Amino acid sequence: MSAKEPRVANQGIAGAERLSKQIGGAVKRGDTVLEVRDLGVRFWVSDGWFTAAQGLTYDLKAGEVLAIVGESGSGKTQSAMSLIGLLPKNGRATGSAKLKGTELIGMSLRQLQHVRGNDISVIFQEPMTALNPVYTVGFQIVETLRTHFLMQPAQAKARAIDLMRLVEIPNPEDSFEKYPHQLSGGQRQRIMIAQALACDPGLLIADEPTTALDVTVQGEILKLMRDLRERVTAAIILITHDMGVVADMADRIVVMKDGQVVEHGTSDEIFNRPQHPYTKQLLASVPHLGSATAEEELPHARLTLVAEGEQTGVPLLEATSAATPAMLMEDVAIEYPKQGRRPAFRAAHHINLRVDPGEVIGLVGESGSGKTTIGRAAVALLPVVEGRLSINGRDITNAKPGELKPFRKEVGIVFQDPGSSLNPRLPVGESIGEPIMLHLGLKGAELSKRVENLLESVQLPRAMRNRYPHELSGGQRQRIGIARALALQPKLLIADEPTSALDVSVQARVLRLFQDLQAEYGFACMFISHDLAVVEMLSQRIAVMRHGYLVEVGPTKEIVTDPQHPYTRRLLAAVPVPDPAEQRRRRELRDAIIEREHIVS
């Protein structure tokens, strides 16, 4: 294969003519870029072949977005990685995949090194693991450029800054010298996109590019990718389980289950006229913002808005019930304590919030807004430095560690990542039974019976108690986390992003389980999430946080249908919904809101 000609350093993507490519040559919008026929992926596991994907057949044109959707384990990622030889050593690809007429399956490693980055680029799911933490982000883009082009360092740096400007990195000259950990999640994802676009590839593989992002950052990344579709002629394979993102981006959709394609069609066909039962089930599992409150009237009164940065300290509490509140925060400020030379950091200011017995309140906001901080303070994992915090009528504002044992019996917490919150050395039955043994003193057969009843309450078999966390799926681990949190039948439960990392169908099952358990046990709950559709489905009221302040609190229906604060409106407009026509309308609304804010500022 012939070497690629050097590129002029100051040539920008937006206005540049596509140079002659190593594979095939220049393409125009609408030309077929990729032809996949009967693609299969197998892995050699325990003296036998395991089929991860089989029978994939599709074509992809320049400027087109093909979404491959399905749950974890459906084979969507492995089938895409097989195109560029990124399977593990025990993996084998079969069938045919032609990039502009050149066969990729069976290509030698040396040939693939020219294809990777040059003709096919990948936007990986987690930029923190894909980017090298010991090099600046600018250096990593430069390295990609100089690997494929004959460029001087200064030329490569100028080109890298142009690419960072293209993906709207703020102050690209300064950001060029930053390390990955110094950038936000959205900025790291933009760097990944810039690196992927460095060589003007004909095909982009985007593997769950927005899964770990807040809805507003996700909206910005999706807008960026839509704009890039108009400015470059690359074809895009979008791998995701988020049907809202699919509705926002995809022209055609491939639905996979257990390694096989169960349905293939246009975005309109899949969303509006699905044929296969699994596709219908997948779409039915997606929480749709606005559907939960469409015909529901909630009895609560609207709470006065709190302006961001307001420092009046006046409690803004809603007298929803005469009963003792499960949680009451009055003008609370929360700080992360000083560590070494790092000063104390105040993460929440003037918080006035009440959760009544049996009530579920949703706490939403972007990463860094302070919502998890409030949840941790509610279970006495962070100190309250101002104001008053009471749980079930007990003031714990200045309680000492030894005084908190009775309080610990009355609160539970479900952590975001059950894999890291469960002890990997203990069977899950022991993890569930530990708080029961410590607080209630139960042992032997009585403890075993209590653990088995808890497993049954979260719809897991009793035999599961002897398994270790790594032997369970993500949904099963999350159920174990819920069972452990409910072990002492708490009056208040803090659920911190308990479904954010789950597939939509698993998420739907966990949410239904959560609703059933809440109805059975009657605990009050603060449900912390950035997924407003999930919060809407579960909560009677919603509290919105930004930059450490509560900016709006009110009944769910009013927050969703008639938000008062500009930030709440922007947050709601950024939520993707699994309906292409509705998503297009919401996208236009969000762009209009952002444009108005720019004009005002």
Image (cartoon, rainbow, N blue to C red):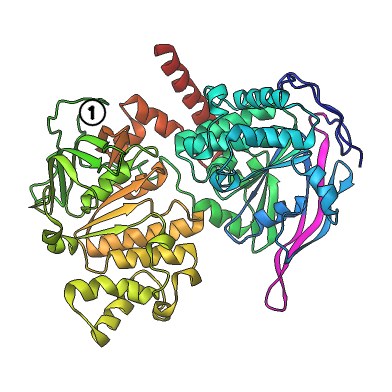
Q: Is residue 30 left or right of residue 471?
A: right
Residue 151: image quadrant is top right
Please rate how many residues cluster around mark 1, counting C-alpha atoms within 10 Å: few if below 14, some from 14 to 19, many from 20: some
Q: Quadrant of the C terminus?
A: top left
Q: Main secondary structure of the magenta part?
A: strand
**Height in image: 419 above or below 20?**
below
Q: Give residue 37's position: percent from left, percent from top.
A: 82, 54
Check if residue 54 falls in the magenta segment: yes
- Please state which of residues 122 and 246 is positioned toward the viewer in this rendering: 122
Residue 540 visible in rendering: no
Report the magenta residues as a range: 28-56
User: In this view, which residue lies farthest toward the bottom?
Assistant: 445
SS for dot 1: loop
Query: At 48% from the left edge and 62% from the top edge, which residue is drawn?
Result: 474
Q: Which residue is mark 1?
A: 305
Q: Position of residue 209 (x, y in %)?
A: 58, 42
Amino acid type for the residue under numbered disc 1: Leu
**Lateral position of residue 525 relative to residue 274, left or right:** left
Q: Position of residue 339 (x, y in %)?
A: 29, 44
